[in-house]
Amino acid sequence: MWEARDKSGKITGSQDPMAWMDYGPHHELEHAPTFCELFDWTHKWKGTDDYVSESTRTIAETYDRTMVDHYAEGTPQFDLDPEA
């Protein structure tokens, strides 16, 4: 995380995190990232679809299952549900 903050600060010329909003995964996705997108971006090997460890895969799968269980199809979901 330190490297990402340092890079964003150098690119924008500012140490204000609000000035960094157009950089990192937000810039690549062209919208604010969801929790799952951000988790995948930070926990998968770059250029692959493989998680860095089995525990991160388990966390992602458990969160996905919990979100499906909590929200019926067609109802709006939060980007991040802390209870899940």
Image (cartoon, rainbow, N blue to C red):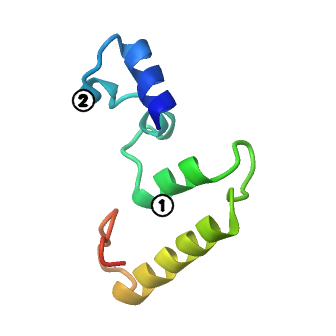
User: Residue 38, image x and y in percent?
Assistant: 47, 51
User: Residue 26, image x and y in percent?
Assistant: 42, 38
In the rendered view, would you say 74 is above or below 16?
A: below
Residue 72 in view: no
**Left or right: where 44 falls relative to 67:** right
Query: Which quadrant holds residue 71?
Result: bottom left
- Which residue is more in the foreground, 31 or 59? 59
Instruction: Compute the Cα span from label 2 to label 1.
Output: 21 Å
**Left or right: where 42 falls relative to 6:** right
Amino acid type shown at disc 2: Met
Amino acid type shown at disc 1: Cys
- Which residue is more in the foreground, 30 or 33? 33
Looking at marks 2 and 1 on the same chain, the residue that comes earlier in the sequence is marked by: 2
Q: Residues within 10 Å of mark 2 (few under 14, many from 20)?
A: few
- Which residue is more in the foreground, 72 or 40? 40
Identify the residue under disc 1: 36
Identify the residue under disc 2: 18
